[in-house]
Amino acid sequence: MSDSEKIRAQPQLERYVWVLAVVWTVVVAASLGWNLVQIKHNTLEVARIQARAAFEKDVIYRRWNAEHGGVYALVTEETRPNPYLKVSERDVMTPLRKPLTLINPAYMTRQVHELAEEKYGVRGHITSLNPIRPDNAPGPWETEALQAFERGKTEDSSVEKMEGEGYMRLMRPLITEKGCLKCHAAQGYQEGDIRGGISVSVPMEPLWAIAQRNITILAVGHILLWLIGLGWLILGTQPLRRSERERNRAEEELKKHRERLEELVGERTAKLREEVTERKRAQEELAKHRDHLGKTVEERTAEVAKRLSEVEQLNSAMANVVEDLRASKETLEMTTRELADANEELESFSYSVSHDLRAPLRAIDGFSKMLVEDYGDKLDEDGQHQLDVIRSSARDMGQLIDDLLAFSRLGRKEMSRLEFDMAALVREVYKKLQLAETQPTTRLDVKALPRAFGDQAMIREVVANLLSNAFKFTTGTEDPSIVVGCTVEGNENIYCVKDNGVGFDMKYKDKLFRVFQRLHSAEEFPGTGIGLALVQRIVHRHGGRVWAEGKVNEGASVYFTLPRGKEEEDA
């Protein structure tokens, strides 16, 4: 064997080793990928199973409640009489004078959902396209699911983001049963109708954590398996290498004998033999390369045809997706227009009703005043007190109507976005409130505030409502104080109005910015319950956010954001 043949043989063996190593790597990687897909699929299926179990549990205790005609529970702060339950004997009194209220299936489901979210993080929401209780109105995802149920679908589920965290959301329809007609027959439902559904949201973070641990174990196992395979491949080729070296030595000996024979036969015969041998070897190599090239061309041709077929299928699928997206966009635009029309009609209705109510209220207040002036000396103390109550109630109702008018006008009021001095605006509003409040000693600490960008008149309403609330809820507090500050994050200014008053329980934070929602009675702290709703609406019209934080008897902080002006961002 010549030196050139030895050099060719050795790399050929190395190439075989490398090819086997690559094939082994691809096999291990494919196994790992397939297992990762299965882990993800199983994790999502476990989340769906948990959501289905929660749904079935809700349906079972709802059916039990409905079959028993509801259950009575002791009236507490958390369990108030249901204002949406229009049945006789909703509220009863025990012989021991303890008040009881009737808990229907929907009320029980809502309280169980709140308890489950607090204890285990699993969220639930009973909803309908035609809810009796406004808070049961569906969200966008739930609306799509309810519409799908009307088309015959029996379940809808997907992983969605809720408050920045992933949840497996699953929803199934609620079928009207005989026991449900007690409350829902008035809505036109009949037995067997789909009247709504229950959505269950299971947090994905614990399940993803388990999946991640399994993935780590799986990856380590595959790496070890891959290393073992490579080690076996390297060690297994050692005998081949030894055989190759022995064959080379044998061929070397054969070459020496052939050279000795060639010297006897003659130089010419040796040359002819070498030429014939080289020609045959070349022909054999050429035939092998030709066969290999033919097979390679056939394989590549088949692969190209397969890839072209896959591309055509992908193009067809993409066309279907684009068509679906176009249809979804048209549906969304139609829904947006309908919602805008409904909001406009609602604002006009609120304005008209509030405006028409002011005339009779003025008459009530005026005639009551005339009674006091003309016949006050003829009325006893109880009669005069009742007239005072009538006048006070009329003034409170007038203030409520004024707030409603202001709330309804926000939807139609044009905005003028200009830059203004927020610190000067806060001090101006504070001085005016000091003259009107019964506790003018409340201290104001205004931190460094950046200039604001927006409608100055609307922002004045925001500041006035927040400072007025701070004055009100620090009444009776030792050394009452208000701090107004601001931080800058990204392209928005985050303003904060903080007081050291009575504060509030954070579990009621979602009620603060709803119209007519109050955490204290009117006897404790007067008000209409519209101020914070007005604040939220103004801030939202500016493209900002608003939220509150607080602790009972430790004060409250209300935050709102405004977009920064272009000059501030450039700076």
Image: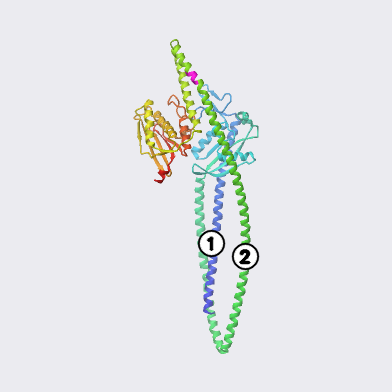
Magenta region, main secondary structure: helix
- In the rendered image, is residue 360 in sight? yes
- Place residue 48 in its image quadrant: top right
Q: Position of residue 4 (x, y in %)?
A: 52, 77
Magenta stretch, residue numbers: 361-365
Q: Separation of disc 2 and disc 1 at Cα?
A: 22 Å
* Tag 2 residue: 299
Callout 2: SS: helix
Q: Position of residue 511 (x, y in %)?
A: 48, 33
Of residues 248 and 158, the one drawn nearer to the viewer in this rendering: 158
Of residues 273 and 353, the one drawn nearer to the viewer in this rendering: 353
Q: Which mark is residue 541?
A: none
Residue for point 62% across, 65% down: 299
Residue furthest to the top = 378
Query: Which quarter of the rendering shows the N terminus?
Result: bottom right
Of residues 151 and 402, the one drawn nearer to the viewer in this rendering: 402
Callout in the foreground (2, 1): 2
Q: Which mark sits nearer the N-terminus, 2 or 1?
A: 1
Q: Which mark is residue 25?
A: 1
